[in-house]
Amino acid sequence: MRRLFGTDGIRGVANQFPMTAEIAVRLGQAVAHHFRHRAGRRRTRILVGKDTRLSGYFFESALAAGLTSMGADVLFLGPLPTPGISFMTTSLRADAGIVISASHNPYQDNGIKIFGADGFKLPDEVELELESMILAGDPRSGADIEQGGNPLTALLDAERIGRARRYEDSAGRYVVFMKSAFPKDMTLDGLKIVVDCANGAAYKVAPLALEELGAEIVMLGNQPNGTNINRDCGSLHPRFAAAKVIETGADLGITLDGDADRVILIDEKGQLVDGDHIMALCGPALKAQGALPHDTVVATVMSNIGLEIALRRHGISLTRTQVGDRYVVGELRRSGATFGGEQSGHLIFLDHVSTGDGMVAALQVLSIMQRTGKPLSELCKVMESFPQTLLNLNVRDKPDLNTLKEVKVAIEDAEGVLGQQGRVLVRYSGTEAKVRVMVEGVDSKMTDTCARQIADAIERAIGV
């Protein structure tokens, strides 16, 4: 059983296990050891970027201490979106890129995730290898590697220690990359766009890219102070941006989360446009351009059945994976498809990026608006959502749900009520101590009732 890595790296409350300086140092050592041996050379180059959380400073230093102590050279990128760090890893030909971010979580949390040299998140087996090194023994014990000891005990001689320095042009390079994802024969001239960066990692690069493409920008969430990331702003709280779209007469609202790997859009009427609707309008557009291999879009089990119906009308099939953008990416790579995402706003355009990128997704939608001359509200009519009730519940632990008799019965009862006209999905969060309940059907009152009954059973069994 994993003790450190979840579905999106290591994550938790800053300064509490596993998000401690000690774990970060040892993770840095493990990463340097792994990539040095895989590359087969004495030195490696590792990038380290972060979002705007206060705790990012000490994690940045702790990781650098571990990395350099094992011979890696470190380039600090500073605050940069997660997809920007993925891009920079490949652009600078680095051996790996490390992201310090807890994405959409509150500022008290932080996380660490790792990209390989190809810009993709590390596979499970590599994360487990790193975890075993981190948790195996004390690096001061002098265990013999040849006798099966911990490789992190082999501390290097002074002359082989790595260096760390700041890389000053990461934001500029990423802005150029983002603009390259927008058609070269188009501009955003004449468009007014509300941009809410959630006081997170995109607070500089997102407005800069849009302005350089010609848009008029109305900014929100661009005053990070270390503790206000995701607080009453961004894609978690888009109602403020929606109000600003109406107030200013904007053509579009773009709301990002703390590390800008996902996006929720807002149409000119102030209505929210989630990842499912973005896939529903981008899928047919890509097919028309001959850029949708196998006529397939990849989404997760959380995506609304309305997406499946909308795509089918255009001769496009929907493949579903378990929840998590890494699983969407994995299926894209396995199947040869190039586009997919999550209802939550992780959108992956593999022709441009190797991970979810909120700004690249927004730019794809903007290109469709400019090409068709239609407002976003009109484009979104391509999909009609079925009623879907989503509940997030705090839990004290995560036992197998099938072992909780009352919960199992509540789920079976709900499935009986919904019949063939709905779905029930109950799963634990991979990054938080929460269980998520999703009920989908043709009637919102029915989905609300079923979801609440399941939630009540869960709260009685394992609620906080």
Image: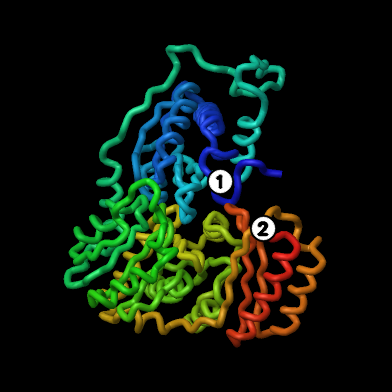
Q: Position of residue 291 (x, y in %)?
A: 41, 67
Question: Is residue 95 in view?
Answer: no
Front tag of 1 and 2: 2
Q: Residues within 10 Å of mark 1 (few under 14, many from 20)?
A: many
Residue at 38% over, 62% down: 233
Quarter assignment of residue 91: top left
Residue depicted at x 26% and y 40%? 169
Which residue corresponds to the image point at 25% horizontal and 46% vertical from the top-left?
172
Q: Amino acid at mark 2?
A: Val
Name the foreground residue: 230 vs 289: 230
| Residue, disc 1 | 12
Residue 292 or residue 134, whichever sits in front? 134
**Left or right placement of residue 188 versus residue 32 in this view:** left
Q: Which residue is mark 2?
A: 464
Quadrant showing the C terminus: bottom right
Disc 1 from disc 2: Cα separation? 17 Å
Q: Are marks 1 and 2 in contact (CB under 8 Å)?
A: no
Q: Position of residue 388 (x, y in %)?
A: 57, 78
Q: Look at label 1 and name its amino acid.
A: Gly
Left-right relation of 245 to 111: left
